[in-house]
Structure formats: structure tokens, C-alpha cells
Image (cartoon, rainbow, N blue to C red):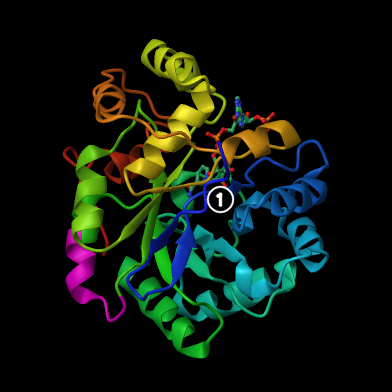
Amino acid sequence: MSNNTDTIKLNNDVRMPAIGLGTWRANETGVLAETVKTAIGLGYRHIDCATIYKNQREIGKALKEATVPRSELFIVSKIFQNNHLPERVGPALDEILDELQLDYLDLLLMHWPYALSPDMGHMGFSTSDLDPVPIMDTWRAMEILVESGKVRAIGVSNFNKSILQKMLPQCLIAPAVNQVEVHPYNPEHELVAFCQENNVAVTGYCPLGGGRVSVLRDATVEAIAGAHGCTPAQVLISWQVARGLAVIPKSTSPARLEQNLRTVALSPDDMRAIGQIPTRERKVDPYPEYPALKWVFHESEAECPVI
Ligand SMILES: NC(=O)c1ccc[n+]([C@@H]2O[C@H](COP(=O)([O-])OP(=O)(O)OC[C@H]3O[C@@H](n4cnc5c(N)ncnc54)[C@H](OP(=O)(O)O)[C@@H]3O)[C@@H](O)[C@H]2O)c1
């Protein structure tokens, strides 16, 4: 098994490495800078960051010491919901660049399709903190950032099909990527097909179940791993890459970082078997904690209030 070096061509011809490093909660052990340096040394070229992970300074330190040219890296970050007002979008990007100590991002995502009031720069908000900023107002401000040269591509995250259907005809620059939770227990068959038909690349987050969804111990996944002499994690990552998705597993363990970069060739039968696993479970869902956000992942029951 060798390192996977596949890339996905985005709708503006920029290439995104198919396997990236997730960094959410990677700072718990205080080894994040070392993890990023190890990952780059092993061959990772795609790093997934976000303002709300509150660890971009440490990642920036590691990037500064990286032994590969900046042009070989694909760095992603996300604008948090308290920065959706158009006049806050540019400064939010500047802050990200300052934290990461970079001149530009390869991809900037709108982290969620809803806004929070400007002083809610952390998780644990209440429903009264929701702010009705239209998605397209934020998106227009992001489109302007592409012209500034500070981002090579822009995209969205946690966007369902019905939001994208309303959004796409209004865009001057269509989202290059939609980053959503994807693993066999939340395969998103319909959303992935819609995105791929519309030239919006999909990045799957929580590809290993995020430490909560038990997909790493799924019997079908384990049986396929046994047949290929690889680990369940490698089966999960290989399945996504074979579907044409990017995937951003998080690990702070050097051995797992190395393992997660090495894919196996799954047969059509393997792909079918994984795609037909019936269990449904997702790690991330703001509803029911916030009933007003039911529409985010339950689009058949509630509609996005402001586009
Ligand atoms: N856009 C969004 O709203 C959003 C939401 C959630 C996540 N994300 C992004 O997606 C990334 C990945 O999601 P995630 O971190 O929640 O979950 P994940 O990557 O699915 O799972 C991470 C967990 O799996 C373990 N792990 C890693 N490699 C393994 C292996 N080979 N075998 C067994 N266990 C392994 C990790 O532990 P060790 O570290 O101990 O190896 C960690 O506990 C995040 O870090 C973040 O960058 C984005």
C-alpha cells in the first residue's frame, strides 16, 4: 500500500488533495504543531482548519516550519457564524490569515448556513443568538475575496440540497466545495450525487465517525478490512476517495496518520456492500438542541428561512 496522491479538480481548475488532515479537537493533547509537521512529513498536503477550532495559531507555527513550499499545500479554513454580516467577512478572513501566518488560503468555507450575532464567537449559543443574515449576502462578500487574491476558492459546509438548489442560480462564483458529514452511517447518496452533477466537490468530515458513531466497528467494514488485510479506517477512507470525495480524518497519532494516507483498491462488490449498509447515525446535528435549526439537516420537514 502506498500513499494516496489523488487530487480532485475543483470548478475553477484548482486541485484539492483527496486526503487531508482534520484538526478539530486536535489541540486537546497539546501536540497539534507536532502533528501537523509529522503529517506534512508523511505526505499530507491538505489541512482542514476553522476559526472555531481555536487552534489556528499553533497550526500556523507548524506551517511556518514546514519543509515543503507553500504552493504544494492546500490550506482550508472556515468563517464562523458570527461573521456572516458582509462587512465582517473580509476582516474574518484577515484574522484567519494572521492566525495561520499565511498570505492566502486555498479554500475558504462558510462553516454553516445560518448566522449568529457578532458577539457569539464560540459554541454554546442560544436560539436568541441566531441572526437572520441572508446566506447570499455572506456569499457575495466571499465572492469579492476571490478577486482580492486572498483565497483561491470558496465553498460551503453543512449545506443541504434544497439550499444549494436555491443558491446556485444566484451565484456569480459557484461554491467549489460542500464539506459535510459523510461515512457509511450517513452516506448522503442524494446530496453527493447532486453536488457532483453540479460540479461542487464534496469533502466528507467525520469520515471515521468522529469517535462517536461506531462505524469503525461495523461488521461489513470489518469483514472488508479483513479481506484486504487493512484496517477498518483504511476501508472507510478508501470508500470515500473511490466515490470521488475528499476526506479529512483527524488523528494525532503518527501511526494512524500514516495509516490514514494509505488507501486500498475496493472492488465494485465492496463499494456496493458499504453503500448499502442500512444503519443511520450522524455525529453532528444542531437539532434537536436548537429546534429553530431543524431545517439544516431535516430539509423535508423544515425549510431554510433566509437565503
Ligand atoms: N465542517 C464541519 O462542520 C465539520 C464538523 C466536524 C468535523 N470537521 C472536520 O473534519 C475532521 C474530521 O472529523 P472528526 O475529527 O470529527 O472525526 P474523524 O476524523 O472521523 O475521527 C477522529 C477520531 O478517530 C480516531 N482515529 C483517527 N484515525 C484512526 C484510525 N486509523 N483508526 C482508529 N481510530 C482513528 C481519532 O483518534 P486519534 O487522534 O487518537 O487517532 C479520533 O478519535 C475534523 O477534525 C474537522 O477538521 C468539520
Picture quadrant of residue 29: top right
Q: Which amino acid does label 1 sit on?
A: Gly
Indicate yes or no whether the magenta region holds residue 7.
Answer: no
Q: Is residue 20 left or right of residue 96?
A: left
Q: In this view, does 69 lie above or below 256?
A: below
Q: Indicate if the residue with disc 1 has its beta carbon within 8 Å of ligand 1.
A: no
Residue 289 visible? The answer is yes
Choose between 28 and 293: the one closer to the eye: 28
Q: How crowded is mark 1: few (under 14 residues within 10 Å), some or many (20 or more)?
A: many
Residue identifier under label 1: 20
Question: Magenta span: helix, strand or loop, mainly?
Answer: helix
- Position of the N terminus, as image quadrant, is top right
Q: Which residue is drawn at 59% across and 46% down?
A: 22
Q: Describe the element under mark 1 as helix, strand or loop.
A: loop
Which quadrant contains ligand 1? top right
Residue stretch rendered in magenta on the structure: 165-173
Would residue 24 be found to the left or right of residue 84 on screen? right
Residue at the image point whose x is 56% and y is 50% from the top: 20
| Image-quadrant location for residue 291 | top left
**Closer to us: 211 or 5:** 5
Horizontal and vertical percent position of residue 221: 41, 19
The answer to whether residue 121 shows anywhere in this view is: no
Please say if 204 is above or below 199. above
Residue 132, horizontal then vertical, whole percent: 36, 62
Quadrant of the image for the C terminus? bottom left
